[in-house]
Image (tube, helix red, strand yellow):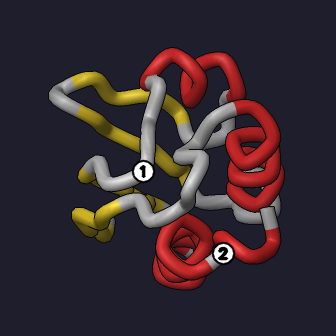
Amino acid sequence: MVERTVRVELETGLQARPAAQFVQEANRYSANLFLEKEGKRVNAKSIMGLMSLAITEGETIILTADGPDETVALNSLIEFVTENSEKV
């Protein structure tokens, strides 16, 4: 299991379209993926769970991955929230 704390740098945060793209990216991996904000933890492959966190730009989140491709999955999701603002 791997875990990282990251700052969301997407201008729109993880709302609507970016949230859907994030979930789509998470579903590419077989690892169990979770996202946590202020003590609330949700499945990173669930659009409803992700939307319930209402993550905005500048907030700090914890990403956790557990499974055979956990490192690749975690790195991909970290890149999405920190460097993907021009693609959203």
Identify whether 29 is placed above or below 75.
Answer: above
Local secondary structure at mark 1: loop
Q: Image check: 64 left or right of 77?
A: left
Local secondary structure at mark 2: loop
Residue 68 in sight here: no
Distance CA(mark 1)–CA(mark 2) = 12 Å
Identify whether 61 is placed above or below 84.
Answer: above
Residue found 56% across the figure and 56% down from its top: 11
Which picture quadrant has residue 10? bottom right
Identify whether 23 is placed above or below 77.
Answer: above
Residue type (three-letter) at the residue carrying disc 1: Glu
Residue found 75% across the figure and 32% down from its top: 16
Label 1 neighbour load within 10 Å: few <14, some 14-19, many 20+? some
Residue on which disc 2 sits: 84
Q: Image check: 2 left or right of 26?
A: left
Residue on which disc 1 sits: 57
Label 2 neighbour load within 10 Å: few <14, some 14-19, many 20+? some
Residue 20 in sight here: yes
Residue found 41% across the figure and 59% down from its top: 8
Residue type (three-letter) at the residue carrying disc 2: Asn
Residue found 67% across the figure and 39% down from its top: 45
Q: Image check: 21 left or right of 50?
A: right
Which sits in the foreground, 62 or 17?
17
x, y percent for residue 78: 48, 72
x, y percent for residue 48: 66, 17
**Could you say which disc has been placed on residue 4 in the image?**
none
